[in-house]
Image: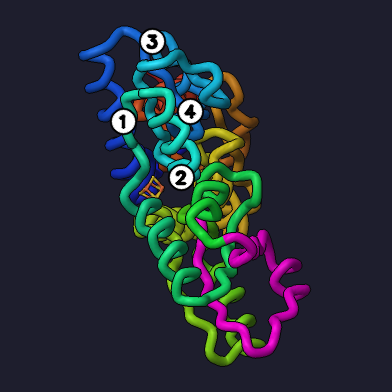
Amino acid sequence: MEIRLAEVYGFCAGVRRAVEIVEDALKEEKKIFLIHELVHNEQVTVELASKGVVSVSSLEEVPEGATLIISAHGAVPQIFAEARQKNLKVIDATCPLVRKVQQSAGELTKHGFHVLLFGKRQHREVEGIIGYTAPGMCTVLENRKDVLEFVPESGKKYATLSQTTLNEQEIAEMNQYLQKQIPDLLISGNVCHATGERQNAVRQLADECDGVLIIGSANSSNTLRLLEVAKEKCPRTYLVSSPDDLPDLTGIGVLGVSAGASAPESLIRDVLQKISCQDPTTCG
Ligand code: SF4
């Protein structure tokens, strides 16, 4: 079986930066607190926990004066305010590209635009972005159905923004549809560059392969979008979150492999090694 890797895959700059920020903080302190997960990947979370990173779901669990890391997905402004009240030392690992969307969201609502935000309501990044908009000035559109059902109010100014890790083509289509309903719609953002280039690379790869593996976690938005994009071209596309859950690869002559932006290099290496060992022609 021939294995082909996507031209771009794995850790993006924002995730790499967040991991490095935490590793640097751990050189100074043995125990640091992290609100939610640094990135959406089990292996990264487990590894950081073993080094002294305690994940919490609210600041009530963090002792006065401790060090708090804000994840790559960002956080609502209230978290920063609460942290100040508790005298926490805040280290902000929010990806600069997520920060840019938060700032745009704030600016747009300040200038009277109602923000139509493409994204998943429960996703931390989306919660964070909403936190920067004025009350009642943001509507989340999760999918095409939400977009079709959305009824704009006349006389209102609208702008669209997007969670950084969605399907780039779907965003373009949803923007196009909304533009027909709202001729002066301001299209103010799209998925981030890392997401776009990984999706393009996996689309091209899936076109050339009989099977595709996407390495990453089921709770990672960008990983699920890679799965979606690859599946459009290659029905035998599978999500692999660990070397132990490889699917049956029988009959696949050319196998494409990509990985989500939060999948660490060690996981990708372990999965590739396991595939080689399942294939008697390549296992040494
Ligand atoms: S996927 Fe994009 S926005 Fe998200 S952390 Fe990576 S570079 Fe930043």
Mark 3 C-beta to ligand 1 under 8 Å: no
Q: Amino acid at mark 3?
A: Gly
Chain part drawn in magenta: 135-163
Residue 257 showing in the rendered view:
no
Residue at image coords 52%, 76%: 113
Q: Position of residue 228 (x, y in %)?
A: 60, 53
Circle 2 residue: 77
Marks 2 and 3 sit apart, C-alpha to C-alpha, by 26 Å
The image quarter containing residue 237 is top right
Label 2 crowd bin: few (<14), some (14–19), many (20+), radius 10 Å: some
Task: Point out residue 260 in the picture as x, y percentages from the top left corner.
Answer: 46, 41
Whether label 1 touches label 2, CB < 8 Å = no
The CB of the residue at mark 4 lies under 8 Å from ligand 1 = no
**Residue 101 on image: x %, y %:** 41, 59
Q: Residues within 10 Å of mark 3 (few under 14, many from 20)?
A: some
Query: Gap in Å between the C-alphas at discs 1 and 2?
Result: 14 Å
Q: Mark 1 and mark 3 in contact? Answer it, CB < 8 Å.
A: no
Q: Look at mark 4 in the image and give the residue it sits on.
A: 35
Q: Earlier in the sequence, mark 1 or mark 2?
A: 2
Cα gap from disc 1 to disc 3, whole angstroms: 15 Å
Determine the residue located farthest toward the front in the rendered image: 85
> Tag 4 or tag 3, which sits nearer the N-term?
4
The question of residue 58 being in magenta is answered with no
Question: In the image, is 83 to the left or to the right of 226?
Answer: left
Residue indicated by mark 1: 91
Q: How many marks?
A: 4
